[in-house]
Image (spheres, helix red, strand yellow):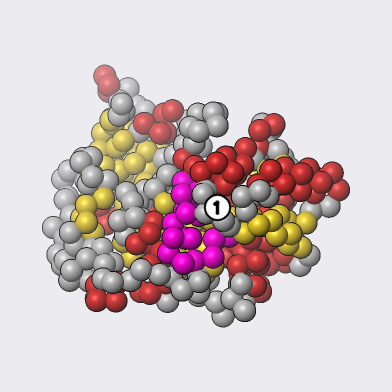
Amino acid sequence: MIRWRCAHVTAVLRSWPGAVEVEAAPEAPGGVPAPPVRALAYTALVGAPQVGDRVLLNATALEMGLGTGGYALVAALPDRLPPDPGGPGHLVKARYTPLQATVAGADEQGSPHHDLLRDADDVGGMPVVVADLHSALPAVVAGVRQAAPGARVAYVMLDGGALPAAFSRTLAGLRAAGLLAAVVTTGQSFGGDLEAVTVHSGLLAARHAAGADVAVVAQGPGNLGTGTRWGFSGVAAGEAVNAAAVLGGRPVAALRVSQADPRERHRGVSHHSLTAYGRVALARADVVVPVLAGALGERVRAQAAELGGRHRLVEVGVTGLEAALRALPVRLSTMGRTYDQDRAAFLAAGAAGRHAAALLG
């Protein structure tokens, strides 16, 4: 299940909040030199590796050639362990794995937000944009901020993709540019500004502890899928719609759209969106249908019509969104495709953000 490697750090390449990327040379069996690999260390878990450090690597994703997991992961610096953490924190994330970690929950006793969240039961009509893929996040934020520049946007991270928030350079870039007010990590995901047990408590924390005007709910980078209708981590998008509605929010469903995906089931509106919103989401949401030109626009409109019996379809124009998307301080990429290769994907997400901003009144 795990492909373990011992290695020595040969170079520190770059870093961003919570993560350090290094080059490490694995110790090959029989003394045969092995080529160096890129490895990622989460500093809150293992400390900050330095040149010369011996590191224990989990090389599973790297050796399997997974796209998002193109790193070996530093599991430990056995000769230079970090100090024991101090302070409060009783939530255990990545539970019962070798790297389980304790974090301070936003609503647990001892938290500065405990009294605020203890009896919280409503998000007061806050627009909640739900998306399947992490790659939609910056586009949604661009759409919100273009229409409502002063809006406080919080990201509520689900645990269907990467668990550490620090894995996302998108989050680091958006935070550094002041475009996100807070990151709330829910379920087994961890490392946000606020930690929550469920998407429900995460939305309450976003609204009441972070003071968000708009929340964006999506899984972390990467996703898990088997090519079947139900075997994909984006099913949680439908569940997030239900959570937002139960808490008195305004669910806004961002469609996963593509003009370039080689798989027919993802062309136009992805079957993932049709399943998550058409079968899993039981609460009514505003499904944002981007007004796209030509045959693609007609296809998206026809596919989205399948959701009209359960949800309210809202057509939103995309004129002017390209400027906001290109002005983002982070790279736009979805399933390995850039903005210029698959504009529809980002325009659809941006349109959902634009609609959420319109709901602020």
The quadrant holding residue 324 is: bottom right
Residue at coordinates 32% horizontally, 60% vertically from top-left? Answer: 196
Q: Position of residue 80 (x, y in %)?
A: 17, 50
Q: At numbered mark 1, what does the secondary structure look like: helix, strand or loop?
A: loop
Residue 278 located left or right of residue 57: right
* Residue 243 appears in the rendering: yes
Of all residues, the one furthest to the front in this rendering is 309
Residue at label 1? 131
Instruction: Give amino acid for label 1.
Output: Ala
Of all residues, the one furthest to the top in this rendering is 30
Residue at coordinates 22% horizontally, 52% vertically from top-left? Answer: 92
Residue 110 located left or right of residue 51: left
Q: Residues within 10 Å of mark 1 (few under 14, many from 20)?
A: many
Residue at coordinates 57% horizontally, 47% vertically from top-left? Answer: 277
Classify the position of the C terminus by image quarter: bottom right
* Depth check, front residue: 134 or 203: 203
Residue at coordinates 50% horizontally, 29% vertically from top-left? Answer: 226
Q: Main secondary structure of the magenta part?
A: helix
Above or below — where is 162 with respect to 348? above
* Residue 221 appears in the rendering: no
Q: Position of residue 39 (x, y in %)?
A: 37, 43
Q: Position of residue 236 (x, y in %)?
A: 46, 46
Residue 214 shown in magenta: no
Above or below — where is 323 with respect to 345? below
Classify the position of the N terminus by image quarter: top left
The quadrant holding residue 318 is: bottom right
Residue 90 located left or right of residue 135: left
* Depth check, front residue: 267 or 287: 287
Q: Which residues are magenta?
A: 236-252
Q: Position of residue 57 (x, y in %)?
A: 29, 37
